[in-house]
Amino acid sequence: MNITFEDFEELDIRIGKIISVEKVESSDKLIKLLVDLGTEKRQIVVGMAEFYEPDYFIGKEVPILVNLEPKTFRGIKSEGMILAADVNGKPVLLHPEKEVPAGSIVK
């Protein structure tokens, strides 16, 4: 399915820096991240615990879809989505080629 360029322009993707992480109790898959987006910090829940230890995420800069409607997982509100590549069913984090300010817009 194709989308229009206008549809793409509706996506607000920014670089966030992961500043804290904790495994979600009673879940084998979920990790709760606190992400610095420059002007604000957001909580994001990711289903990557079966692939990565929580400490792996600390300090990483990753693209975040910030205008996604919030969703609740196991009672924890998630306020965005990390964009990652899927390699044989395993998520691989995407990173800027060099350090950029938190909140930088991805175009």
Image (cartoon, rainbow, N blue to C red):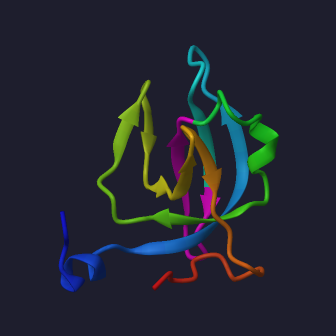
Q: Residue furthest top?
A: 26
The reply, left or right, for residue 73 in relation to residue 43 is left
Q: Nearer the viewer, residue 19 or 83?
A: 83
Does the magenta run of residues contain 91? no
Residue drawn at the location 55% of the way across and 55% of the way down: 85
The reply, left or right, for residue 90 in relation to residue 4 is right
Pinpoint residue 11: horizontal percent, then vertical percent: 33, 73
Q: Nearer the viewer, residue 10 or 36?
A: 10
Does the magenta run of residues contain 37? yes
The relative height of residue 25 versus residue 6 in the rendered view (above or below) is above
Q: Nearer the viewer, residue 51 or 67?
A: 51
Q: Residue furthest front?
A: 88
Quadrant location of the N terminus in the rendered image: bottom left
Task: Give the quadrant of residue 56.
Answer: top right
Q: Over which residues does the magenta segment extend?
A: 35-47
The mark total stands at 0
Task: Give the quadrant of residue 88.
Answer: top right
Task: Give the quadrant of residue 50.
Answer: top right
The reply, left or right, for residue 27 in relation to residue 11 is right
Residue drawn at the location 65% of the way across and 31% of the way down: 49
Dominant SS of magenta comes to strand
Residue drawn at the location 77% of the way across and 79% of the way down: 99
Pinpoint residue 35: horizontal percent, then vertical percent: 62, 58
Pinpoint residue 65: horizontal percent, then vertical percent: 43, 64
Quadrant location of the C terminus in the rendered image: bottom left
Pinpoint residue 70: horizontal percent, then vertical percent: 34, 49
